[in-house]
Amino acid sequence: MKNITQDMLETLIQKLQSGRQPVASQTKMSGEMGIPGAPINAPMDAMTLALMGKIESESPAEIAKLINALSLLSSDVGYGSGRFYDSSGSPEPEYWLAGIWAIASLNWPSGKDIARKWSEQSDRYTEGGFEKAWGSYNPAHTNGIGIGSLYKRAKELGWNQVDVQPQVNTANLAPPTQRFTLLGINDLAALPPTKHLVKGILPSSGLAAIYGPSGSGKTFLALDLIMAIACQSDWFGHKVKNAPVTYVGLEGKGGINNRIQAWCIKNPSLTPSNFKIILDNFDLMKASNVDELAKAIIAAQMYQGVIVIDTLNQASPAADENSSQDMGVIIKHLKLLQEMTGGLVLIIHHTGKNTSQGLRGHSSLKAALDANIEVVGADKRSWLLEKSKDGEDGKCFGFRLEVQNLGADSDGDPITSCTVERDHSAILSKPEPSGKVQKAALKTIKQALSSTPNKRMTVEAGVSEIAKTLTTIASNRRTNRARQLLGNLSADGHLSSELVNDEGWIWLA
């Protein structure tokens, strides 16, 4: 049986010598390979290289050799630039991408699975980041990396090729066409638990939001949170893991420096060494902007940390937040940024005109979040963990804003800003109602009461305010339903009431 014709081999050798990548071609072959004269369509680059001895063909022995060499190379190093050695021949300390590309250059069916299993040994591994790195390999690159560089680096780290066992069990390597993995109950139980940046509050990767109405203190709270992450300092009694923080400040740029200086005054013993700020304009609706931001963060070694976008509105000024199409683009690009950099993307967002409706904009945003913190109040502030992946939803903590004196301006007027101080009096506060409709009704009443001179209002006014929000109920039933909700809030102790001149009055308990 003939494996390859002489004409075919000579043609391929000429292409290799000319520096071009072999391409798929139709070559007529005869003999036992198939029907005489039948064309065979196949890319010959990797096969021809193997025939000429340029790369190793896939076999149990070669797979064992690669896996053994990888045991000397750490996948927990930095992303790198796709090289094991710099232009002077010195070893690059960060070479994860180079390892991925070197394995990809083999063009083995099992190569991707081997590269993935090696990469998964790092705590910073993300499936999205791996897929992007694997897909970025370019076999046509003029100075492309090969497996030889990987073996050379492994030898420098102590690898002895003689020790490689000639056989390896490849049963655990997924078939190249298998995209989905079926897990049993025991397999599921063996998966690692969700990792948190702030235990029970924020996961180490995914999408999260801090939102609230204007003047609620959400920006100060967000800054306090990310500074705790940058310094690995406990936050509201929760353990915190250290991670790089990149703050994209798009709203109130003039006050960012004052807020940071105020925080430093309050926390003189803490130094956020891995905290960076971006003040350049950024458009989340443009994929090119997302790509450039991700590359800048990776180049600065700030990946696999936290990226804060303050605010979502300023990052997507031309978008219609209520449009499912525009919000779909926003969510897609947020996820792209997260996958390219790893870690957590945290957005700062507003509530709508009706604060009881929660996050402003299309409901798909909330559904896409892994964690969501709501900030409420003006005179008495608090934050509520509305949603957290594998966390305890419903946690509520009070805080107040403490004024810090930063000095004086050129006119001699004082310069001040605020920092967050935990308000323990919130421990004695009545817990929020658990029902979604009841919670929305209470928020509506709180908002209405905040604008009254003495923080009191008539029962009928309260009924009217709640009825306005019940848009999913038939209009002829809204008043009765609103009166029922108001009565429940009073019965549960959230509202106090009294009768004055035959007119009912309510206020917060």
Image (cartoon, grey):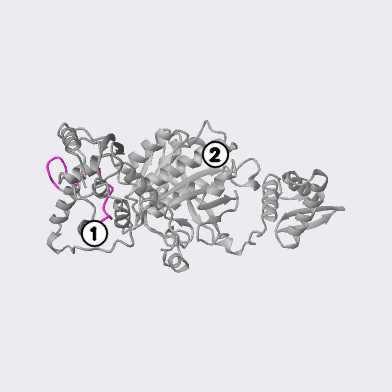
For the stretch drawn in magenta, what is the main secondary structure?
loop
Does residue 160 show up? no
Mark 2 or mark 1: name the one nearer the start of the chain: 1
Secondary structure under the numbered disc 1 in the rendered image = helix
Could you say whether the residue bearing mark 2 is in a helix, strand or loop? helix
Tell me, yes or no, if residue 298 can be seen here: yes
Residue 67, horizontal then vertical, whole percent: 24, 58
Outermost residue, right side = 502
The amino acid type found where label 1 is placed reads: Pro
Any mark on residue 60, and which?
A: 1
**Front residue (pair 60, 190):** 60
- Crowding at dot 2, Cα within 10 Å, few <14 / some 14-19 / many 20+, comes out as many
Question: Measured from the top left, where is residue 79 in percent x and y?
Answer: 28, 47
Residue 327 is tagged as 2
Q: Is residue 393 left or right of residue 407?
A: right
Between the C-alphas of marks 2 and 1, the distance is 49 Å
The image shows residue 1 at horizontal and vertical percentages of: 21, 47
Extent of the magenta region: 72-90
Residue 505 versus residue 83 in the image, above or below: below
Q: Residues within 10 Å of mark 1 (few under 14, many from 20)?
A: some
